[in-house]
Image (spheres, rainbow, N blue to C red):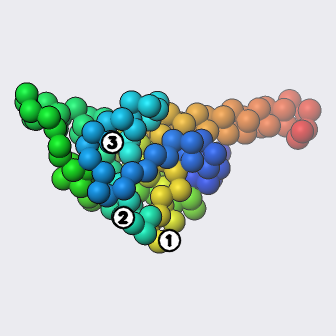
Amino acid sequence: MTNTKLVSSIDAVARSRLETIDLGASLVDVAKRLSDTQIALVVVCDPDGTMVGVITETDVVRQIGRCGESACTTAAADVMTRNVTSCRPTDSLLDVLSMMEKRGLVHVPVIDEGSRPSGVVNARDALRALMAEEKYEASLLRDYVMGIGYR
């Protein structure tokens, strides 16, 4: 069995995981956005809506730890990761999950042709979708072999 499920197959959950913030935002704004959600990654966008970077909860904690006793007034642009690993809706979910594993990533932004974010793939969501498809295919194969035929 080959798994051909695409990133677009989990579009609804990927969209629900998307949080964006303006390039000019402060790190405090990013921290507030992250604390108001169950999301661990914020996509930083320029005024045109193009992705220019990402900031994770780990990035925020690391930077606040460096601020010491003073108020942390760091700009999001100074903390974000600029060389972002991303994927497209037409990419294979299995390929994206494999790439995430190799690079040690838990979240990957989904972008369109203009580098505008449309969602965020979470490794757990991708794995669930792939496992569900495999279980369904195994069930069809078992029914066929047992003489029940395809559903």
User: What is the CA distance from the residue labelled 3 to the residue labelled 1?
Assistant: 26 Å
Measured from the top left, where is residue 2 in percent x and y?
62, 49
Q: Quadrant of the C terminus?
A: top right
Residue drawn at (33%, 42%) of the image: 30
In terms of secondary structure, where does tag 1 sit?
loop
In the picture, the disc for residue 30 is 3
Residue drawn at (39%, 66%) of the image: 47
Measured from the top left, where is residue 72 in percent x and y?
16, 38
Above/below status of 69 relative to 144: above
Local crowd at mark 2 within 10 Å, few (<14), some, or many (≥20)? some
Along the viewing direction, whichever of 105 and 13 lies nearer the viewer: 13
* Chain-order first, disc 2 or disc 3: 3
Residue 126 visible to the viewer: no
User: What is the CA distance from the residue labelled 2 to the residue labelled 3?
Assistant: 15 Å
Residue 22 visible to the viewer: yes
Above/below status of 24 relative to 66: below
Residue drawn at (48%, 58%) of the image: 117
Q: Quadrant of the N terminus?
A: top right
User: Which residue is disc 2 drawn over?
Assistant: 46
The three-letter amino acid code for the residue at tag 2 is Asp
Local crowd at mark 3 within 10 Å, few (<14), some, or many (≥20)? many
In the picture, the disc for residue 113 is 1
The three-letter amino acid code for the residue at tag 1 is Glu
